[in-house]
Image (cartoon, rainbow, N blue to C red):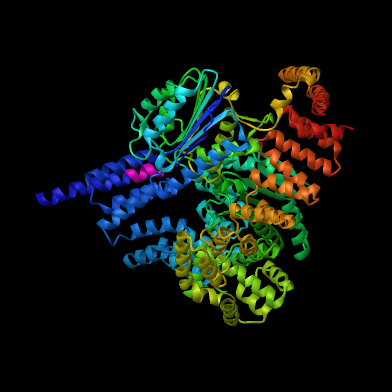
């Protein structure tokens, strides 16, 4: 199955390619396809036109088709665009080379890096959710690219659960921890990482995967999924003064939080409560 | 002559060197002794005696695995070596393994004068509460060796356990080992204060009896006297050789700094700091609820507070049960101290902590009411009975092992049932014994009423044997009681036992039908066999096969019905219970959904999703107080969505009319997410 949203956006866009690789057995095939389907559905929800979503799964997730998709994105994306690659499935690592398992020939880490390096999008995110994915992290590392892997090295070879929780992060509002109606790459990673750790802890199993992220700061400013209407309000000129007032209060809150460790707890709490009340009132005015 | 001289030289050398090794051992130079033994074995590898003597040394130095290996090698070299059989038997006896007796019989067959074998047989018999056999074996040992200290100690123990003065105690004299043996019998009969008293005598008589120092430390630790326990354990640990029990106990005492204790006038709850805030409300409530129930039921008020210790690391809990017979797998009671696994210490759904707590709390009352004079079967049986008396879905379900035991007529007579706990003769006998003892108490309550249980407790407090109590209190001779009890078992479980083999086959077929997606057949077949073995709620249970098939057909009511049976009977899989609650919620049955999730609080409360969903349901159904409790638990677990959980707690406080707390929680939510609009709105509402 191949699913591509047809639009080629005129403005800043995010190109998202999801690939569910070879399961090797029916249970895994079914699981990987399901995760890819869910991801595709979540990304297409809301009819946002600034996204170009493409999903390769099942028999269509071949090396040739993956190469073709990446080449197509390389030809369409512009520097102001963003690019996301999500890989679900099994990987292998022989000590030197990582391979993403696909129906037919696998794609190697080196081949993948070469394809990704051709994509001109200025902000990139690669989420490799396969076993052994830690083995490819260094190869994919690039200044404008955040790399997330399900394992810390190429030697963590067992099938991973991280991918399940990554997809959960995209549909669970709880992942939006700062409640700004946007799930950043960092929020999704932290959600999935925590759930993965919890999984092994609850099952009393030795953790066989340790998710990694190469740059938290960059991931924090990478919006993976937006929902709500915050952006629309921000552009309303009639609310300019109110927005400025809100920004001012927010700055004061940031300053107060920065000084928290230097303050008496009661004093901090008192000031925080007042500022939060001020902010809440300002927001209520904006929302009128 | 030359030939004879050639033979004599190595023999003399051996005798001298063996003596040297044993002299070194007597002088506490076990490393030196071990070295000499190694040399001896190198020079004469086919000498079974060297192996046995060396094994004896290693056994005393707690190196049981190497000792075991040497005894076995000795028996290969000399299949008639009585001391090797004795050594092997000693290792098995330490694990309460009944096979020890077979080896002791072989030892005596090969050396009828081996009085230590009779001593060990006497010990095992008394562990089984078979005083007649214990006395006879002790006499047999004393007939061979008049001052055999363990035989004397067994005879003394028989008297002391029956609360009689014993002339045999004086015969122990200054031999600490004898007092240590008496302490052992008090310990396995849960009379820890008496055990401590005799261990003190043991170490006073023989200050370098390090094992007794260790046992004293562990007994003291059991009763919460950790300062003195540490001193005794450290004495044992400071020796060149010490056992793992000593080291583990010291490690556990060290770990107590990671715990915090919450006290009320009648309770003390020791929880690991990392989960204390989550577990405390649930444990505290069940402690108080169970104590109120038992106080009324047993007409008895405890004179001391009860301390409950909850261990998230099963290994820590395991230290508390070291050296005890039976399972001790979930919880253990030492007078008014309960130690148990934390729900976080086991995979979700495997452990019903509240059931275990009520079980152990029952022991606290029965032990206090009888001053520790109660047979094992009765206190365990009553504790098992109380689990399902608290709630029918608590306690353990009928397992395939128990079905097999009933089918194979392996249930023990009432007169012998204690043996099943201490010296099990087959793999599942401890579990079967718990079940049987529980059912006996169920049966007594059903036939004679709760008061009869109370009367029996009072009789056992007078140190009366089981057989006499059964005769006098129930008016039945033990054989008649057994017959009537088995008739009840047959009535209750006969259908399951008879149909179990076929049921197993049918479940396999259900599994295949499930793989083939034949939903209608699964529903028909599943419903037809559910009644054969209704207690089976483990992985692969029929209810779930049917419920999943119903869902595939889009018949949610049918799935609700199936999982309703599953839940009522005691199914504990959190994922299934959450699915069931979701279906109920979607069907508008919010109260029932909340009740389904509340069951999980007694099983696996360390689950953020559970508290979040239950909090929402309770809030929706007007139980603001319950919602506060659930959201407090959620906040205590530091969930990913910190802002959302504090906001929900604020909502619950607001609903409960606690505006100040609501405002505090709203501010805390906003601290991590200042632009969180629902929290802003709530803050304004509660600040008006």
- Kindly tell me whether residue B633 is visible in this rendering: yes
What residue is at 65 percent from the left and 68 percent from the top?
B463
Relative vertical location of residue B486 with respect to residue A6 in this rendering, above or below: below
**Horizontal side, residue B201 vs residue A283: left or right:** left
Front residue of A39/A139: it is A39
Number of callouts: 0
Relative image position of residue B308 (x, y in whole percent)? 67, 49
Q: Is residue A81 magenta?
A: no
Closest to the observer, B322 or A153: A153
| Residue furthest to the left | B2
Percent x, y of residue B658:
85, 40
A58 and B450: which is toward the camera: A58
> Which residue is most to the right?
B688
Q: Which residue is drawn at 60% across and 78% down?
A: B488
- Whether residue B208 can be seen here: no
Judged left or right of residue B139, residue A175 is right
Closer to us: B488 or B591: B591
Quadrant location of residue A46?
A: top right
Residue B476 image offset from top left, x and y in percent: 64, 82
Where residue A83 sits in the image (x, y, percent)? Answer: 51, 25
Relative placement, left or right, of B595 versus A171 is right
Above or below — where is A128 with respect to B248? Answer: above
User: In the rendered image of this protein, does residue B490 appear above or below residue A38?
Assistant: below
Magenta residues span B20-27
Q: Is residue B23 magenta?
A: yes
Placement of B571 over or under B272, stated as above or below: below
Q: Is the magenta stretch mostly helix, strand or loop?
A: helix
Screen quadrant of the C terminus of chain B: top right
């Amino acid at each position: 199955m191949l699913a591509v949203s047809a639009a080629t956006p005129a403005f800043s866009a995010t190109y998202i390619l999801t690939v569910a690789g070879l399961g090797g057995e029916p249970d895994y095939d079914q699981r990987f396809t399901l995760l890819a389907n869910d991801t595709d559905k979540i990304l297409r929800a809301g009819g946002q036109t600034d996204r170009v979503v493409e999903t390769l799964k099942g028999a269509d997730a071949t090396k040739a088709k993956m190469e073709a998709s990446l080449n197509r994105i390389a030809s369409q994306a512009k520097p102001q665009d963003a690019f996301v690659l999500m890989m679900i499935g099994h990987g292998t690592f022989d000590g030197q080379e990582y391979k993403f398992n696909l129906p037919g020939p696998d794609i190697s880490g080196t081949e993948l890096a070469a394809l990704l390096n051709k994509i001109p999008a200025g902000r990139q995110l690669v989420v490799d959710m396969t076993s052994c994915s830690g083995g490819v992290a260094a190869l994919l590392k690039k200044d404008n690219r955040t790399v997330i892997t399900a394992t810390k090295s190429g030697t963590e070879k067992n099938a991973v659960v991280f991918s399940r929780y990554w997809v959960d992060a995209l549909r669970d509002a709880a992942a939006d921890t700062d409640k700004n109606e946007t799930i950043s790459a960092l929020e999704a990673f932290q959600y999935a990482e925590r759930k993965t750790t919890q999984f092994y802890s609850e099952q009393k199993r030795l953790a066989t995967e340790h998710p990694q992220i190469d740059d938290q700061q960059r991931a924090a400013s990478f919006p993976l999924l937006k929902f709500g209407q915050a952006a629309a309000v921000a552009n309303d000129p009639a609310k300019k003064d109110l927005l400025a007032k809100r920004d001012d209060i927010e700055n004061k809150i940031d300053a107060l939080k920065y000084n928290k460790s230097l303050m008496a707890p009661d004093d901090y709490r008192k000031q925080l409560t007042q500022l939060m009340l001020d902010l809440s009132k300002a927001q209520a005015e904006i929302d009128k | 002559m030359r030939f004879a001289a050639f033979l004599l030289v190595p023999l003399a050398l051996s005798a001298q060197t063996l003596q040297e090794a044993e002299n070194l051992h007597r002088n506490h130079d076990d490393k030196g002794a071990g070295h000499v033994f190694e040399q001896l074995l190198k020079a004469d590898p086919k000498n079974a005696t060297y192996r046995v003597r060396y094994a004896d040394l290693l056994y005393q130095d707690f190196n049981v695995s190497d000792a075991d290996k040497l005894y076995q090698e000795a028996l290969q070299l000399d299949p008639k070596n009585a001391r090797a059989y004795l050594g092997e038997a000693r290792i098995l006896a330490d694990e309460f393994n009944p096979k020890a007796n077979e080896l002791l019989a072989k030892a005596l067959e090969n050396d009828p004068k081996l009085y230590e074998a009779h001593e060990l047989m006497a010990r095992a018999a008394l562990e089984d509460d078979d005083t007649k056999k214990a006395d006879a074996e002790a006499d047999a040992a004393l007939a061979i060796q008049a001052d055999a200290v363990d035989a004397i100690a067994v005879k003394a123990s028989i008297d002391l356990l029956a609360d009689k003065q014993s002339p045999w105690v004086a015969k122990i004299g200054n031999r600490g080992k004898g007092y240590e043996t008496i302490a052992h019998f008090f310990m396995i009969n849960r009379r820890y204060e008496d055990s401590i008293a005799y261990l003190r005598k043991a170490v006073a008589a023989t200050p370098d009896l390090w094992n007794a120092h260790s046992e004293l430390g562990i007994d003291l630790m059991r009763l919460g006297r950790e300062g003195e326990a540490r001193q005794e354990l450290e004495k044992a640990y400071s020796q060149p050789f010490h056992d793992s029990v000593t080291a583990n106990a010291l490690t556990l005492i060290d770990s107590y700094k990671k715990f915090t204790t919450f006290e009320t006038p009648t309770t003390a709850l020791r929880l690991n700091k990392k989960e204390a805030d989550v577990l405390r409300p649930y444990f505290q409530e069940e402690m108080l609820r169970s104590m109120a129930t038992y106080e009324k039921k047993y007409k008895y008020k405890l004179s001391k507070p009860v301390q409950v210790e909850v261990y998230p690391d099963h290994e820590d809990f395991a230290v508390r049960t070291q050296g005890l017979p039976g399972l001790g797998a979930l919880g253990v009671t030492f007078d008014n101290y309960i130690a148990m696994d934390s729900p976080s210490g086991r995979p979700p759904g495997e452990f019903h902590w509240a059931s275990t707590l009520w079980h152990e709390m029952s022991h606290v009352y029965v032990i206090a009411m009888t001053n520790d004079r109660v047979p094992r079967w009765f206190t365990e049986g009553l504790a098992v009975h109380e689990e399902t008396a608290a709630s029918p879905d608590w306690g353990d379900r009928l397992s395939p092992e128990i079905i097999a035991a009933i089918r194979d007529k392996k249930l023990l007579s009432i007169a012998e049932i204690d043996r099943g706990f201490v010296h099990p003769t087959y793999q599942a006998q401890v579990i079967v014994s718990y079940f049987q003892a529980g059912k006996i108490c169920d049966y007594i309550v059903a036939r004679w009423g709760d008061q009869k249980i109370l009367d029996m407790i009072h009789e056992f407090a007078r140190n009366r044997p089981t057989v006499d109590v059964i005769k006098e209190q129930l008016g039945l001779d033990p054989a008649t009681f057994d017959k009537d009890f088995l008739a009840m078992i047959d009535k209750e479980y006969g259908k399951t036992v008879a149909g179990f083999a076929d049921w197993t086959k049918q479940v396999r077929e259900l599994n295949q039908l499930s793989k083939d997606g034949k939903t209608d057949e699964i529903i028909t077949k599943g419903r037809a066999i559910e009644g054969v073995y209704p207690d089976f709620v483990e992985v692969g249970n029929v209810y779930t096969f049917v419920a999943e098939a119903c869902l595939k057909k889009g018949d949610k009511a049918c799935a609700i019905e199936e999982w309703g049976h599953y839940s009522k009977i005691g199914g504990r899989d959190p994922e299934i219970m959450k699915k069931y609650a979701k279906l109920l919620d979607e069907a508008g049955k919010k109260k029932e959904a909340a009740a389904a999730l509340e069951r999980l609080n007694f099983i696996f409360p360390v689950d953020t999703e559970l508290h979040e969903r239950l909090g929402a349901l309770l809030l929706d159904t007007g139980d603001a107080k319950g919602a506060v409790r659930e959201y407090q638990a959620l906040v205590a677990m530091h969930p990913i969505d910190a802002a959302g959980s504090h906001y929900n707690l604020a909502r619950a406080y607001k609903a409960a009319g606690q505006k100040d707390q609501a405002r505090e929680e709203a501010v805390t939510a906003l601290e991590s997410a200042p632009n969180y609009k629902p929290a802003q709105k709530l803050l304004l509402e509660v600040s008006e």
